[in-house]
Amino acid sequence: MKYPNKLREIRKITNVKANDLADLLEVSFQHYYALERGERQLSATQLAKLSVFLNIPIDGIVGDYQINNEIIEQKKSKEQLGFHGQQNIKMASLIARANSLPDQNQEKVIEALEALVKYHEDNKNKK
């Protein structure tokens, strides 16, 4: 069964190399091309990583969201990703993984994150 996605289209528009996307997704070159051809399905974590790396909404990769050069003009190459991009990918991956937790645990994760952000904002405002 084929799973439609826009990976090839996005890769061509952004001029990102397939090898870089395979590295980002932590899959082999062959596995990446199977994803691009729709022979394999992207995981939630992979979608989150692609979304952050390419600066495209997830439904721009697998949904009906229209892709154009304006959306993609802020593309990032592997070398340009840097610390903040890597942190964003980690956050996106954790959020995708947290979605599989039981509802009660998801609420605890949300409460902890909200408390941490509020603490940081409060201390930032005191300076």
Image (cartoon, rainbow, N blue to C red):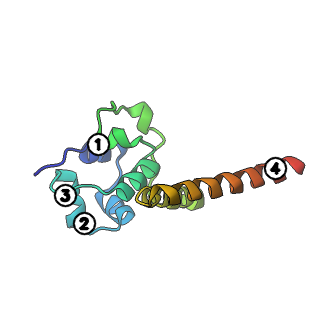
State the residue in front, 25 or 14: 25
- Is the residue marked by circle 1 packed among few (<14), some (14-19), or many (20+) residues within 10 Å? some
- Which residue does the numbered mark 2 point to in the structure image? 29
Please say if the residues under marks 2 and 3 sit with CB atoms less than 8 Å apart: no
Residue 54 image label: none
Name which of mark 2 and mark 3 comes first in the sequence.
Answer: 2
- Is the residue marked by circle 3 packed among few (<14), some (14-19), or many (20+) residues within 10 Å? some
Q: Position of residue 122 (x, y in %)?
A: 81, 49
Give the secondary structure at mark 1.
helix
Name which of mark 3 and mark 1 comes first in the sequence.
Answer: 3
Look at 59% across and 61% down and name the residue there.
83
Q: Where 27 sits versus 38, above or below?
A: below
Q: Position of residue 10 (x, y in %)?
A: 31, 43
Q: CA distance from mark 4 to mark 2?
A: 46 Å
- Which residue does the numbered mark 4 point to in the structure image? 122
State the residue in front, 121 or 6: 121
Please say if the residues under marks 3 and 1 sit with CB atoms less than 8 Å apart: no
Give the secondary structure at mark 3.
loop
Q: Is residue 63 left or right of residue 88?
A: left
Name which of mark 2 and mark 1 comes first in the sequence.
Answer: 2
Name which of mark 3 and mark 4 comes first in the sequence.
Answer: 3
- Which residue does the numbered mark 1 point to in the structure image? 62
- Which residue does the numbered mark 3 point to in the structure image? 40
Q: Is residue 52 visible?
A: yes
For residue 88, which quarter of the picture? bottom right
Q: Is residue 80 visible?
A: no
Give the secondary structure at mark 4.
helix
Q: Residue furthest right?
A: 127
Q: Is residue 11 left or right of residue 106?
A: left
Kind of residue sitting beneath label 4: Asp
Kind of residue sitting beneath label 1: Val
Name which of mark 4 and mark 2 comes first in the sequence.
Answer: 2
